[in-house]
Amino acid sequence: MSPSVISPCTGKWIAHSEDVPHGLAPPLLVLNNVLVVALQVPPARYGTTTAAARRLLGPLFAAGGITMTLSATGGTLRAICLLTASAVAFTLAETFHATVSWELSVALAPDAALGAYLGVHGLAQSGRRGIGPLAVTAAIATRPLGWTVFGTAIAVTCAIQHRLVRDRLQRSPLSVGPVTVSEH
């Protein structure tokens, strides 16, 4: 797993903000990298069943979008706290999403089409990498409204995915065993 794309975008947001010291960007990038390294394995235990995997989609992305939006509406101290919270929320969301998306792609695939489903999963990841920077640039350009739309779009997409996969998922555990490395 690579560091979150959102935290570098937080740095871009900081560079365009008049209320936030530009020196906040490097510590947030370090925080992002530390969280990604520390959370490589622990989220796996939260995606051990399809129901658990479904529940993880959305809330952290929404929290990141809300805190990012609110960071543009107050003074310097408030913006620093909210940007830090946003960086943490988005990093956690992306870390959990990496686990959940893999588990759901395996769970939804019929045995005869596992390769095709995993191929589409990889294509979706590539699409995210291509469209994500454009979406974040638009959010930066439109300030609080943009971050509100950005966070809402991600949360709505997760809610739609949650609804669409609800009845298609198997009830048995997925590829992650009931005891993961993080529990030892």
Image: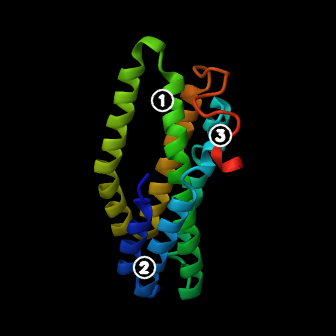
Query: Can residue 1 be seen in the rendering of this structure?
Result: yes
The circle drawn on residue 105 is 1
Element class at badge 3:
helix
Disc 1 from disc 2: Cα separation: 34 Å
- Given residues 36 and 184, the one toward you in this image is 184
145 or 167: which is nearer to us? 167
Displayed quadrant of residue 140: bottom left
Tag in front: 2 or 3: 2
Give the Cα distance between marks 2 and 3.
Answer: 32 Å
Q: Nearer the viewer, residue 133 or 170?
A: 170
Establish if 70 lies above or below 159.
Answer: below
Q: Amino acid at mark 3?
A: Arg
Q: Earlier in the sequence, mark 1 or mark 2?
A: 2
Q: Of the residues tagged 3 and 1, which is closer to the observer?
A: 1
Q: Residue at x 34, y 29 (%)?
A: 119
Which residue is disc 2 drawn over?
Answer: 26
Whether 12 is drawn above or below 44: the answer is below
Relative image position of residue 154 (x, y in whole percent)? 48, 48
Label 3: which residue?
Answer: 55
Asked if disc 2 and disc 3 are in contact, CB closer than 8 Å, the reply is no
Say which residue appears at 71% left-offset and 48% top-offset.
Answer: 183
Spatial CA distance of label 3 from label 1 is 15 Å
Q: Quadrant of residue 89?
A: bottom right
- Percent of width and height locating residue 135: 34, 55
Q: Secondary structure at mark 2?
A: helix
Q: Is residue 65 shown to the viewer in this render?
A: no
